[in-house]
Image (tube, grey):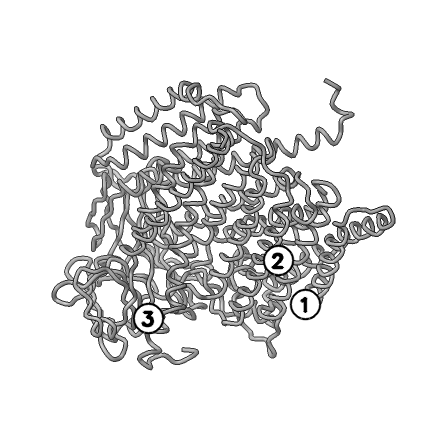
Amino acid sequence: MNAKKRRRLYFAAALVAAGGVLAVAIVYQLGNNVLYFYSPSDIAQKHVEPGVAFRIGGLVEKASVRHGASADVHFVVTDGARSVPVEFAGVLPALFREGQGVVATGALNPTGTFQATEVLAKHDEKYMPPELVAALKRQGRWKEGE
Amino acid sequence: MLGELGQLALCFALGLSLVMAVSGLLGARAGAPNSALNSELARSIASASTMGMMVFVVLAFGVLLTGFVTSDFSIAVVANNSHTLKPMIYKITGVWGNHEGSMLLWVLVLSLYAGAVAAMGRGGPRLTSAALGVQGLLAVAFILFILFTSNPFLRLDPAPFEGAGLNPLLQDPGLAVHPPMLYAGYVGLSASFSYAAAALIVGEAGWARAARPFMLIAWIALTCGIALGSWWAYYELGWGGFWFWDPVENASLMPWLIATALLHSALATEKSGAFRTWTLLLAIGGFSLSLIGTFLVRSGVLSSVHAFASDPTRGFFIMVLIFCAIGGALGLFAWRAPTLQSGATFDTVSRESALLLNNVFLVGACAAVFVGTLYPLGLDAMTGQKISVGPPYYALTFAPIFLALLLLVPFGPQLGWRRGDHKAAFRALLPALGLGGVAAVAVLAIASPRFLTGALAFAVAGWLIGASVLDFFKRKGARASAFAAALAHAGLGVTLMGVAGTTLWRSEALDVVGPGETMTVGPYTLRFDGVAEVKGPNFQATQAQLALMDGSRVVTVLRPEKRVYPAEGQEVADTAIRTTGMRDLYLALGDDRGNGRWTVRAYVSPLAPFIWLGALVMAAGGFLSLWGRLRLKLATASPAIQPAE
């Protein structure tokens, strides 16, 4: 084996090692950093632990939105079968409406209230996030063309 | 009448792109003695049909544009996405503010690049002809896609009196130019793709030099397009962030990473013949990621502001198209690449090695983004489990890879081709290392709170910018294009400072304020002076007045708004931003809390403008390189002007 070939071999080995490290890092970080999407029914079924971050999706229950003393806001997310109270300190998106779809990121606190760090509503009147549509369809709350 | 004209033009364009594909591929054959005439004839037919195709696509696009400008609501797309009261600029940008029109824009850009390939004829007649053949195949596929699943010229009978308007989020000057810019980048990679495929067909090695200007244009456009999109998200979405690792943002970042790798790898191929096959693979990969990005954005599988209401046949069609294009190109690669000459040799320490490392890191970073973006889709398809991958994943995978890449960037330009001297390079870079150290110490001393990551980021930024300045002085007196790399690399440092400043030292406040009350955010004190109703051309706004105070003196008044667009029945927040260049004060108006009290969200983002300034500097570097290339070509094309040296 001459010097050139040996260098190539070292180089290839280094590349494979780097690729391996990258793959392990990606898989490991992916395992720790995915956010699951749950509807209120999923939460009841799967017994989601408090403090575990996830995304919740459903409809904002009619007449459930109320503002707290400071900038916090409270509302209830429902999928027809079950509902979960949500607390959020922030500015609600402009398209946030009672009776309409919403997706929020956050975690449950020990009392079972969803503490949202981010709230997303629909982007326009015709468009709904696909995971929300799927969740509402499961509960029979989705009509095509709605 | 208008709609039919557009439809007809598109059909003609389809026919001509078929001719283009067949004659282009026929013209790529070597001119054997008895078939020479035929090959030459095929080449001229390919060129002519390319120009014809381009003219008809421009015509079709012009027809749709006219439809939007004159509010011809007999065309369904116009009726669904325009409104007579909309300002003219948004009537025009409405052309690509919907699925059908944006696909037509896609094909328009494709045809303009094909026209440029034909007109410039870089790399000789056979290579050009084969490249046009491949561009022709792409044009056929995408025009078919438009005609069968996304026809922008469908009619409404009877025509409505008024249109439905455009999503107000899209009625914004930043977003007016974002899609064409991004498409110029996305689709611009098709030229590199076609040249790479042509090189495999013809077996010619000079394709990297021939495709260089197209790579540069695509890269510049992609850089600007991504920067514009991020800037828009920053001031329009009202969350104060500039990058959300949204799958759609990732869809544009991945081709950028590969295009950047391609620019560097192609340089080595051109200068010393190294990485021949690898460069081909990158050219194929870059455009493949553009296609995947188009699929992600246009098929409606993602929840995003970019997704228009869509139907599944489109997704299926694009998926088939992607499989054909990527599969075909990779098949061609597997079949023909082994016949290409093997690469030149180089030392372990050399410019080539540096470029190779650059490629390893860029492709690694792209892989991390790719997995994060597509894993949720794959999991959903297989198990129905809905998940999303958040920013922490990218902070822990993409960020370290990219930071490591940035650490190595300064060495590249200091090393010679084939054989470099790492000790000399290191000595030459000592002042840059010093600048990095000073930047880190300065950040630790001045900024509060102290962040080690912040010091590291500023050290790397100082190192990058210092090395660029050194490179600049080393090349003093050279052609302007020799400074392109220094400029682009300095831009990276500028953006890095902006990203670090905004992410680490941003302060925010969320308060409910009544008239006369004040709120503080960072070093600023703001007095809320109530709201006023304002009327815009096609919206009604509730405009808050917040006075920026210095003691009892009013420095300036900021006016964040909430706009209601009656035609679309939507509400959109409009932020108010005051920038000093070094720091942004950013206000968004929240909910009406009764009795004249409103929720106001305020951010102070240090160095935020640097994020986009850096991107502009990078793009300027690209321009410099492009300008050097084209000037060089002019100089060699007209030797009579230049006296012999």
Check disc 1 and give the amino acid type: Gln
Most extreme residue toward the right is: B34
Residue B395 shown left or right of residue B514 in the figure: right
- Please determine whether, in this image, residue B187 is positioned above or below residue B206: below
Residue B298 shown left or right of residue B610 in the figure: right
Q: Which of B574 and B504 is in front in this view?
A: B504
For residue B218, what is the image quadrant? top right
Q: Name the residue under label 2.
A: B107
For residue A107, what is the image quadrant? bottom left
- Please determine whether, in this image, residue B319 is positioned above or below residue B224: below
Q: Mark 1 points at which residue?
A: B7
Query: Do the dots labelled 1 and 2 sit on one chain?
Result: yes
Distance between mark 3 and mark 2 Cα atoms: 35 Å
Q: Mark 3 points at which residue?
A: A101
Residue B120 place in picture, x, y as percent: 71, 42
Circles 1 and 2, Cβ within 8 Å, touching? The answer is no
- Badge 1: few (under 14), some or many (20 or more) residues near its Cα, within 10 Å? some
Please give the name of the residue rendered at 38% of the width and 20% of the height, measured from the top-left corner.
B431
- Please determine whether, in this image, residue B537 is positioned above or below residue A98: above
Check disc 3 and give the amino acid type: Gly
Q: Which of B640 and B139 is in front in this view?
A: B139
